[in-house]
Image: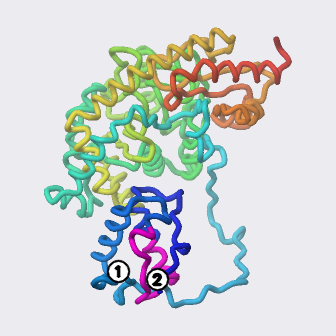
Amino acid sequence: MAIPVENFFLDNTTQGTLQTRVQQMIASGILSGRFERGEKLPSTRKLAHHLGVSRITVSLAFTELQSNDYLTSKDRSGFYVSQNAPPPPTFSTKTGNQDKVDWAKMIGQRFSIENWPSKPQNWSSFPYPFIYGQTDQSLFDHSNWRQCALMALGAKDFSSLTSDYYDQDDTELIEFILRHSLPRRGITASTDQVLVTMGAQNALWLAAQVLLNQRRTAAIENPSYPPLRDILEQSRCHVAPVNLDEYGLIPDQIPKETSVIFATPSHQCPTTITMPLERRQQLLEIASNLDALIVEDDYEFEISSKKSASPALKSLDSEGRVIYVGSFSKSLFPGLRLGYLVGSKPFISEARALRASVLRHPPGHIQRTAAHFLRLGHYDALINRMAKQYSIRRSIMATAIKKYHLEIAGNTSPQGGSSFWMKAPKKLDTDILASRLIKNGVLIEPGKNFFAPPDQPENYFRLAFSSINEEKIENGIRIVAENIMKLTGSN
């Protein structure tokens, strides 16, 4: 007797092709002990009919499982669970155990992500997702990325896939950064001045851990990227929030005891202010007078509405005081987690040693796949496509914001980037607004957590357009405006 077809069902939440999902379904049944060695499987015809897939899909899945010794075939009899199939676990699951550890006492240091920008897991199913940093699948080059991933899996790149890079990085990726990415920002560097990281946030963490301690002070923008404050708290340094004006961070307000200044001059997070050249030079002068370092987070420079982007702060630095943070996660996709640090050799050497002790290195396959994608010109084509589309969306959103009488904080449209920093009426709590908008299919980011406590205004919010269809922008803005009017009682 064959195993009844009713024992087989496809999990719609799993990823991959139908063939992959059928393979996973059967392998899971064997590994869990539901299908025992020697048991006969249903015929490919019956199982295909039951699952609602083609017979060839099931046949290919069976053949692949046979090659991996999960199944075996017998002439004119069908497929059986192989006698050599991996055995299910023999241990029994213990139930009723009580955790008797006093974790409040045992945890030596506390970490939190409560203040980080959040979004529902199913954000892409919302009709109006005005949330930041997410990928628009319609713009991404899936085909060429897949081809580059396959190239990176080939025999030619086997060493890059399997090598232990704890003391170095992928040579092709570093070469692209040195010869292409950095020169576009006016930066020159050598191989020993660049370190690949697991995204910009990992780069910020490495910089904070290497440069700061309990006796040092870090100056940050206010408002600023919420996870940065958590990163600095982990270093146990003193944190000094510095206010902004229409030109960005105000250098004269940086405390004299500051050791490291964290700044986002190209597109300030979250206000999108672009710091002018004169202010950048003033910031460098202040840092020199204080004998302080600057960590420049250039997370979004690729997405500029200007033909000529402002020079990076690092490119103006003549004293080696600026540590530059770059990222591919915004321009490619956030799940890539690939960024880089650029700084003087002594700093990069320490950051590399810290990286090695924590995660050794970013996966070699990811580095080489990205290197192929960049080297073959797919990245530049993607950036151009994104820049054009973002320019259209930015214009549509600016027009809609004006039409429905919403207020851009600072009354200035962003010069690039992928979001607008908004100011609601003073008496409105945008956390309440965001909760109400979810019921209308609209997602926004409340702005309170971008500000340093204890003075955190509640009437700011961010509207991003990286992952919303241009045809839905105006209607989404209209819904936001209507809900603000209802909550404030204004006409």
Residue type at mark 2 is: Ala
* Along the line of sight, the residue nearer the viewer: 349 or 450: 450
Q: Position of residue 474 (x, y in %)?
A: 60, 18
Q: Residue at x 43, y 74 (%)?
A: 27
Q: Is residue 39 magenta?
A: yes
Q: Tell me, what colour scheme is on the image?
A: rainbow
Q: Position of residue 306 (x, y in %)?
A: 38, 15
Let me know if residue 293 appears in the view. Answer: no
Tally of marks: 2
Q: Is residue 447 magenta?
A: no
**Up-down relation of residue 139 to residue 206 (above or below):** above
Q: Position of residue 227 (x, y in %)?
A: 57, 43
The residue at which mark 2 appears reads as 2
* Along the line of sight, the residue nearer the viewer: 64 or 440: 64
Q: Residue at x 45, y 17 (%)?
A: 392
**What mark, if any, has residue 101 been given in the picture?**
none
Label 1 crowd (10 A; few <14 / some 14-19 / many >=20): some
Dot 2: element:
loop
Mark 1–mark 2 Cα distance, whole angstroms, equals 10 Å
Q: Position of residue 206 (x, y in %)?
A: 43, 50
The residue at which mark 1 appears reads as 78
**Magenta part of the chain:** 26-47
Q: Are marks 1 and 2 in contact (CB under 8 Å)?
A: yes
Q: Residue furthest right?
A: 489
**449 left or right, relative to 75:** right
Which quadrant of the view contains residue 160? bottom left
